Image (cartoon, rainbow, N blue to C red):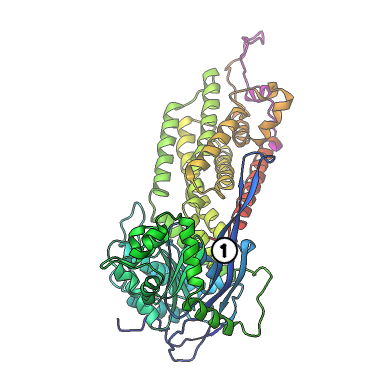
C-alpha cells in the first residue's frame, strides 16, 4: 500500500482534545496518534426479572463485569474469553455503548473522562456487518463521509478521503460493486468486513473498536493483518475475539483474558504463555495459545502442569476461576498496571455519578434528510422484490377482482356484487400493508448502529422511510389498482366518483401501513409482528359492516367498530358508489315491492346505518387521517425510545 493506513486527507489536520477530533485546513497531512484508554474499577451488572404475574415476579441482579482495571495503548489490543465471559460487554463499556444505569467505575481517554458523545467520536465495527447491501462500496463510504464529517470539510476533501480509504483498504477492484444482500450477489466476506471498517475510519477515530471481527470469515486473516498494519502506525484498536488461531494471536500487542467477567490476565500478549507457565499451566508444544487459554479457563487437566494435576483433579470450575483471579492479582503484571493507573489518576478522584451519554451530529437536519432519503429510494429501486414486485402483484389482483366483478349491473345482483367488491378492495389494502412490517425490522441493526454513531437523527430516518414507503409502495399501487379495477367493475362513471374512490383506497392503505409500523417498530422478528397485525386486521374485518349489520350489535360491543380501519374505508366507498343509484328499474304501478328488495342506494345505506351526506363521506376520510397520524406518532416514539445501547 502506497499510503499509511492512518494518514489523513490533504488539507486536514487532526488534533485531539479528550478524544475529540478537530479538523483544520492547514494544507499538510499529519499521521493520527491513537489515544490511550484506561479503565478503573469497572463493575457492570444487569437486572433480570422472572415470572409472569406481577405478584410472583422476582428481580435478581447479575454481575457481568467485576473489578476490571487496565490500559489499552496504541496498538492491537485483544479481549479474549470463553462464551459468556463478558468480553463483548466489556468492549461495549469501553466504547460507551452500555447502559450507564448498571455501570460503576470510570473509563478515561488520555487521562481525561470520556466525553458524553464518545460513541460518536470513536469507531465501532459490530459483529454482524451493518452496511447497505444495495449500494456500492464507494457509495457507502460517501454516505458515511457526508454525514459524519463536519460541514467545514469541503466536498472535494471528502471525496479524496473516500478514494484514499478505498486504496488503503484494498477495495479498489470492488469499489463500484454492490456490497450484496440475500438476493444480490456482492463482494466477499473479507471485503465486506473491510467496508465496515472503512465506514468507521472516515472520521479518523482516536480509538477503533471491533466486536468479533473474524465472525463469518474464512481461513484468511487479511482483516487482522489490516488491523495490525493500522495499529503499527499509531492507531488504538481494541477488539473482542473468541478463539483465534495462532497466526492471528501472534499479531496482538496486548491481551486481556476474562473469566465470568473477571480478569485473569492483562498484559503483553506474547508474555501470556510465560505467565501461565509460571503459575503452573504449561502449554504443550504445537498447541494453539488461544485454545490453551480456554482449556485452562474451562479446567481441562491436559493443560495443567503435571505437578498440579493431582492438586486440581477434583476442583470445580469455580475454584479454578478463583485461583486464576488470585494468581493474577499477585502477579507483577497486576502491580505494574495498578502503578500506571495510579499515575494517570494522581490528584484526581473517581467519578461517583453515572456517566452521561449523548448523541451529537456533524451535519444539519436538511443534509441528513437529503442523504438518507436518497439512500432509501436507491435501496427501494435496487430491491425489485419490494418495489416492482409490489406493483406487479397489485396489477394482478386488480385484474382478478375486475374479472370476477366485471360489468356490474343496476339490479339486486349488482348491489351484492358492488358490496362484495368494495369489501374485497378495503381488506386487500389492509393486508397488503403487511409488507411494511419489514420496513424497520430488516434494517433494525443498521439503524441502531448509525443512530448511536451520530449519522442522523431519528426523525430524519423516520420521515425518509415513511415518504419512501408511502410514495412508492402505497400511493403508486393504489393509483394503479384504482385505474384497473374501477372501470373493469363498472362503478359510477363520473370523474368525481373515480377520484374519491382513489383517495379512499389510498387513505385505507396509509392508515393500515401506519398501524403496521406502530406494531412492528419495536419488534425484532417479522413473523411475530405479522401475527399481531393479522389478528388485528381479522378482528377489524368483523366490524367493517359486511359480515355483520353494525346497528344490530349489542351496545357493549358496538364501540369496537370505531377501531376498524376497513369500516371507515368501506363506508366511504359505499357512500361514494351507492348514492344516486337505482336497482329496481321501473317501480310497479301499485308502488309495492317484493319483501327484502332495495330499490335505491340511499335506502341500502340507510339500512346499514350509514350517514350518506357529504359530511358523512368526509368524516370517514377525516377519521382515517387522524388514525394515520396517531399510529405514526406511536411508531415514531417507539423508535425514539428504542434501546440506545447495543
Disc 1 marks which residue? 98
Residue 192 seen in the current view: no
Please provide percent x and percent y for residue 466: 55, 53
* Rendered image quadrant of residue 512: top right
Residue found at the very far left of the displayed protein: 286
**Depth order, front residue of 443/524:** 524
Please provide percent x and percent y for residue 123: 48, 72
- How dense is the environment of label 1, judged by Cα within 10 Å: few (below 14), some, or many (20 and up)? some
Membership of 602 in magenta stretch = yes
Please provide percent x and percent y for residue 463: 57, 58
Membership of 342 in magenta stretch = no
Residue found at the very far bottom of the displayed protein: 27
* Rendered image quadrant of residue 636: bottom right
Residue at position x 30%, y 69% in the image? 246
**Compared with residue 99, is residue 29 higher up or lower down, i.e. above or below?**
below
**Compared with residue 49, is residue 229 higher up or lower down, i.e. above or below?**
below
Main secondary structure of the magenta stretch:
loop
Please provide percent x and percent y for residue 65: 55, 63
**Depth order, front residue of 18/371:** 18
**Depth order, front residue of 26/217:** 217
Residue 622 seen in the current view: yes
Residue at position x 71%, y 22% in the image? 554
Q: Is residue 257 left or right of residue 520?
A: left
Label tally: 1
**Depth order, front residue of 611/190:** 190
**Compared with residue 167, is residue 243 higher up or lower down, i.e. above or below?**
above
Quadrant where the image shows the N terminus:
bottom left
Range shown magenta: 587-615
Q: Is residue 117 left or right of residue 616?
A: left
**Which SS class for mark 1?**
loop
Amino acid at each position: 500500500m502506497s499510503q499509511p493506513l492512518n494518514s489523513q486527507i490533504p488539507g486536514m489536520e487532526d488534533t485531539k482534545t479528550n478524544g475529540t477530533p478537530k479538523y483544520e485546513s492547514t494544507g499538510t497531512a499529519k499521521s493520527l496518534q491513537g489515544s490511550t484508554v484506561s479503565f478503573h474499577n469497572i463493575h457492570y451488572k444487569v437486572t433480570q426479572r422472572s415470572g409472569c404475574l406481577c405478584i410472583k415476579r422476582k428481580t435478581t441482579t447479575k454481575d457481568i463485569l467485576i473489578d476490571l482495571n487496565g490500559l489499552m495503548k496504541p496498538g492491537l489490543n485483544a479481549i479474549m474469553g470463553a462464551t459468556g465471559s463478558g468480553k463483548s460487554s466489556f468492549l461495549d463499556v469501553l466504547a460507551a455503548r452500555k447502559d450507564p444505569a448498571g455501570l460503576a467505575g470510570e473509563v478515561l481517554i488520555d487521562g481525561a473522562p470520556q466525553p458524553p458523545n464518545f460513541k460518536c467520536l470513536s469507531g465501532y465495527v459490530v459483529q454482524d456487518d451493518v452496511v447497505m447491501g444495495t449500494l456500492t462500496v464507494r457509495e457507502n463510504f460517501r454516505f458515511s463521509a457526508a454525514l459524519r464529517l463536519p460541514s467545514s470539510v469541503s466536498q472535494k476533501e471528502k471525496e479524496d478521503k473516500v478514494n484514499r480509504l478505498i486504496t488503503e483498504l484494498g477495495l479498489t477492484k470492488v469499489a463500484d460493486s454492490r456490497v450484496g444482500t440475500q438476493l444480490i450477489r456482492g463482494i466477499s466476506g473479507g471485503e465486506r468486513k473491510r467496508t465496515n471498517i472503512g465506514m468507521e475510519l472516515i472520521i479518523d477515530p482516536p480509538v477503533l473498536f471491533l466486536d468479533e471481527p473474524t465472525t463469518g470469515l474464512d481461513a484468511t486473516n487479511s482483516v487482522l493483518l489490516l488491523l495490525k498494519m493500522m495499529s503499527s502506525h499509531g492507531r488504538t484498536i481494541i477488539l473482542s475475539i473468541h478463539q483465534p488461531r495462532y497466526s492471528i494471536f501472534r499479531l496482538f500487542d496486548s491481551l486481556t483474558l476474562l473469566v465470568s467477567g473477571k480478569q485473569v490476565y492483562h498484559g503483553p500478549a506474547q508474555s501470556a504463555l510465560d505467565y501461565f507457565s509460571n503459575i503452573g499451566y504449561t502449554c504443550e508444544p504445537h498447541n494453539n495459545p488461544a485454545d490453551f487459554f480456554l482449556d485452562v479457563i474451562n479446567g481441562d487437566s491436559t493443560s495443567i502442569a503435571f505437578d498440579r494435576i493431582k492438586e486440581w483433579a477434583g476442583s470445580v470450575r469455580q475454584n479454578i476461576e478463583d485461583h486464576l483471579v488470585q494468581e493474577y492479582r499477585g502477579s507483577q503484571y497486576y502491580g505494574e498496571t495498578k502503578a500506571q493507573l495510579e499515575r494517570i489518576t494522581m490528584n484526581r478522584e473517581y467519578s461517583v455519578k453515572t456517566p452521561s451519554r449523548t448523541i451529537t451530529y456533524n451535519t444539519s437536519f436538511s443534509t441528513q434528510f437529503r442523504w438518507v432519503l436518497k439512500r432509501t429510494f436507491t435501496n427501494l429501486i435496487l430491491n425489485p422484490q419490494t418495489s416492482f414486485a409490489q406493483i406487479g402483484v397489485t396489477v394482478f389482483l386488480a385484474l382478478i377482482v375486475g374479472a370476477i366483478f366485471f360489468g356490474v349491473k343496476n339490479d339486486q345482483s349488482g348491489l351484492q356484487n358492488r358490496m362484495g367488491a368494495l369489501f374485497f378492495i378495503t381488506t386487500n389494502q389492509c393486508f397488503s400493508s403487511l409488507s411494511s412490517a419489514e420496513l424497520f425490522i430488516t434494517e433494525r441493526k443498521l439503524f441502531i448502529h448509525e443512530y448511536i454513531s451520530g449519522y442522523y437523527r431519528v426523525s430524519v430516518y423516520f420521515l425518509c422511510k415513511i415518504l419512501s414507503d408511502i410514495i412508492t409502495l402505497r400511493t403508486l399501487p393504489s393509483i394503479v389498482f384504482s385505474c384497473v379495477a374501477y372501470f373493469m367493475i363498472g362503478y359510477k362513471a363520473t370523474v368525481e366518483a373515480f377520484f374519491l374512490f382513489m383517495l379512499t383506497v389510498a387513505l385505507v392503505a396509509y392508515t393500515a401501513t401506519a398501524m403496521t409500523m406502530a406494531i412492528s417498530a419495536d419488534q425484532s422478528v417479522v413473523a411475530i409482528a405479522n401475527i399481531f397485525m393479522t389478528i388485528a386486521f381479522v378482528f377489524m374485518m368483523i366490524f367493517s359492516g359486511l359480515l355483520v349489520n353494525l346497528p344490530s350489535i349489542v351496545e357493549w360491543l358496538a364501540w369496537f367498530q370505531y377501531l376498524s380501519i376497513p369500516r371507515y374505508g368501506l363506508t366511504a366507498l359505499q357512500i361514494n358508489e351507492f348514492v344516486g343509484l337505482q336497482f329496481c328499474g321501473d317501480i310497479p304501478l301499485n308502488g309495492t315491492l317484493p319483501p327484502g328488495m332495495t330499490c335505491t342506494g340511499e335506502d341500502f345505506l340507510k339500512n346499514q346505518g350509514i350517514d350518506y351526506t357529504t359530511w358523512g363521506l368526509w368524516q370517514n376520510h377525516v377519521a382515517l387521517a387522524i388514525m394515520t397520524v396517531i399510529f405514526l406518532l406511536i411508531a415514531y416514539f417507539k423508535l425514539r425510545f428504542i434501546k440506545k445501547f447495543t
